[in-house]
Amino acid sequence: MKDLISLEGWNNPDIIDLISHASKIKKDPKKYYNTLKNKTMLMIFEKPSLRTRLSFEAGMTQLGGHAIFLDAKDSPLGKKESISDTAKASSRYCDIIMARLFKQEQIKELAENATIPVINGLTDIFHPCQILSDLLTIKEKKGKLKDLKLCYVGDGNNNITHSLLLGCSITGMDISVGCPEQHMPQKWIVKIAEKNAKKSGSKIEILNDAKKAVINADAVYADSWMSYHIPKTQEKARIELFKPFQVNDKLMKHAKKDAIFMNCLPAMRGYEQTAEVIDGKQSIVFDQAENRLHMQKAIILKLMHTLV
C-alpha cells in the first residue's frame, strides 16, 4: 500500500491492523519519538483546517520528523504548474505528502505522479483519515466494531457519509443514513458499501426519516450542514431543509440508552445538533478529535513502512 486516497479496496484486516497500531502509539508515544528522524512531510491545504493540520504537524513532530505547510493559494498547484509536476518535484524534496483538496480527482492525480506516499487529508468526496480515527474511537468506547449500529444524520452527500459507508461496511458495522431525499449519498459509493456489507455481514439503510434511522443505534453521528464549499446564499434554505435531521435530546432517545454521540468538528450548536447533545454525557467529540493524532501517526508509519 503506497497511498491512502480512500477506503475503497481496503479490507477488515487493514483497518483492524491500523487501529491496533494507533492504540499502541497512543499508550506509549515515547517509543516512537525518533521513528521518522530527518523525514519531511509536505502538507498541501486548499481548504481551511484546524484538526487536520494540527494532528498531522504535531504527529510528524512527535515522530521525530518535520512538516511543511503549503497553502494552495500561495502555490502554483493546478494553475501555473500541473498537479503531476507538483507531485514529481515534491517527491524530490519530501518523504510523504498529505493534501486537503476540493476534488478527489486531484488527490488521485497527485498520488499517481508522486513517488512518495500521498494521504488524502479530505476532499469533497472522501475523508478517510477522519473515519479511521472514528473507528478507533468507537472501538475504545464499545470494545468492538462488528455487530454495532452507527447512524449518520444530516447531509448524506458529503465526505463523512461516504467514508462512513465504506468504513462501517468493511468492519461489519451496520450503518443507517438519515438524510433529505435531495441529499442522498452518491449511488456508486453505496454500491461499493453494499458489496462490502455482503462480505462482512453488515446492513446498510438509506432513509429519509431521522427517527427511523436512529432507532437502536449504538452511535449517532452528525456533521456540519455548512461544508466549506457551500455558498452563504444557500445557508437559510439548508437550515430549513436539514432542521428535521437535527440531533437533539428527543432524537437521541430513539437510540440505545448507552449510545454515543459523534461529530468530526467543527460543530455549530443549534444547527446539526443542540448544545445539550454535543456538550452532554453521551458526547465523545473531543475523544474523536484527540484520536486524529494517534491514527494519523499510524497511517504515516504504515505508508512509510516503519510500523513497529
Image (cartoon, rainbow, N blue to C red):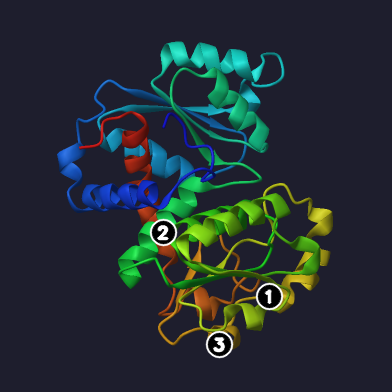
Gap between marks 1 and 2 measured at Cα: 23 Å
Q: Quadrant of the N terminus?
A: top left
Residue at the limit of the structure toward the front, as seen here: 199
Marks 1,2: beta carbons within 8 A: no
- Going by the numbered disc 1, the residue's amino acid type is Phe
- Going by the numbered disc 3, the residue's amino acid type is His
Q: Which residue is mark 2?
A: 135
| Left or right: where 242 falls relative to 57 | right
Residue 132: give x, y in percent of width and height: 43, 52
| Left or right: where 256 falls relative to 304 | right
Q: Residue at left 33%, top 28%?
A: 304
Gap between marks 1 and 3 measured at Cα: 13 Å
Residue 236: give x, y in percent of width and height: 81, 65
Q: Residues within 10 Å of mark 2 (few under 14, many from 20)?
A: many
Foreground: disc 1 or disc 3 = 3
Q: Which residue is mark 3?
A: 254
Q: Which residue is mark 1?
A: 245
